[in-house]
Image (cartoon, rainbow, N blue to C red):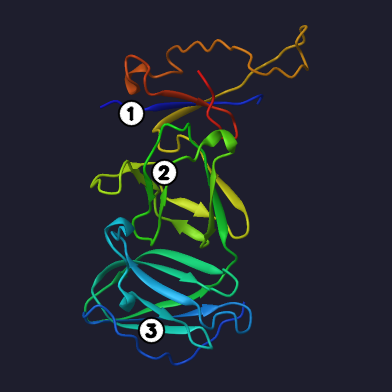
Amino acid sequence: MAHPLLLLLAACLCACYQAKPSEVAGGGGVETTEGNLAGLPGQAAGARVSMIPVDFDARRGSLPESLTTMADANGAYRFHGLKPGRYNLEVWQPKDGAGVFKAGLLLRAGSLERVGTDSLQAPGRLRLRWDGARKGVLVQRGRVFQRVLAGLESDSGGTVLDSLPAGVLPPISYAEALADTSLHAWTDSVTVAPGIVSNVLAYAEWAHQARLGLVTGTGALAGDTLIGYPLLVRLAKPAFDFTQCNGDGSDLRFTAVNGDPLAF
């Protein structure tokens, strides 16, 4: 099956604390997992620490209470009895929203796993842009997260996912309905930086893309601001690989340099 193709159109182009944590009942396995949080003095106390299986899907039920605990006054936490497997670590401090995300921790049978020390950071945000054609529910496997897309359009600048933990988060997918068993990929893993808004392009999952630069020249229109101006884009080999798109052009999309979809 041919991969979709996207063209991007541009105008021109800590302090650490150690303590002996108390044990927390887990999922009935044989794992003991412990770690520490670092931050401002007293910041880590009461932070919620969750160990989330990497295949967890919030549409299918809630995360068991045994997979979440709280850090003590020194930022230490421990899980006892987690089942072997891969988990994502997600931390959230209700007092100030600080957090951290660490993906793909491997817990092995019969061992003591030390997560180490992670620094709490200010939350970040993601702005999702799209052309309004997608409907359904946003999902991130391995996080306690889902959001309905209905009524959210990109012509208003997209929608902002708020209060996200800093780190490399799992890919964003969407289902056309809550009951759907299949998910459609939207992004690869996404990086959330603390304290800022990061943009996810409208067609981030498109496998191929190219950037077009416009040269306005020195003619009568040079320097003018053009709005709604029709532009002919001629695609040709070898720059454009026609074997990687649908023969009728149905998987071709255009965006502005900031990721906003363009009419075509």
Query: Based on the displayed image, in which of its 4 quarters is residue 184 positioned?
Result: top left
How far is mark 2 from mark 3, CA to CA? 33 Å
The residue to which callout 1 is attached is 3
The residue to which callout 3 is attached is 78
Which residue ends up furthest to the top in the rendered image?
Answer: 220
Q: Where is residue 25 in the image (x, y as percent from the top left)?
A: 30, 85
How far is mark 2 from mark 1, CA to CA? 15 Å
- Answer above or below: position of 26 versus 103: below
How far is mark 3 from mark 1, CA to CA? 45 Å
The reply to whether callout 2 and callout 1 are in contact (CB within 8 Å) is: no
Amino acid carrying label 3: it is Arg
Q: Position of residue 233 (x, y in %)?
A: 53, 13
Mark 2, other Cα within 10 Å: few <14 / some 14–19 / many ≥20: some
Q: Residue 89 carries which label?
A: none
- Answer above or below: position of 242 versus 136: above
Query: Based on the displayed image, in which of its 4 quarters is residue 4 positioned?
Result: top left
Q: Left or right: where does residue 228 sit relative to residue 48?
A: right
Q: Quarter of the image containing the N terminus? A: top left
The residue to which callout 2 is attached is 187
Instruction: Tell which tag, 2 or 1, sits nearer the viewer.
Output: 2
Which element type, helix, strand or loop, lies under badge 1? loop
For this rendering, which residue is in front, 238 or 143?
143
Q: Left or right: where does residue 35 sit relative to residue 162?
A: left
Amino acid carrying label 1: it is His
Mark 1, other Cα within 10 Å: few <14 / some 14–19 / many ≥20: few
Amino acid carrying label 2: it is Thr
Which element type, helix, strand or loop, lies under badge 2? loop
Q: Tell me which residue sits at (49%, 87%) in the image.
A: 72
Which element type, helix, strand or loop, lies under badge 3? strand
Q: Tell me which residue sits at (60%, 71%) in the image.
A: 96
Q: Tell me which residue sits at (27%, 58%) in the image.
A: 60
Sequence-earlier tag: 3 or 1: 1
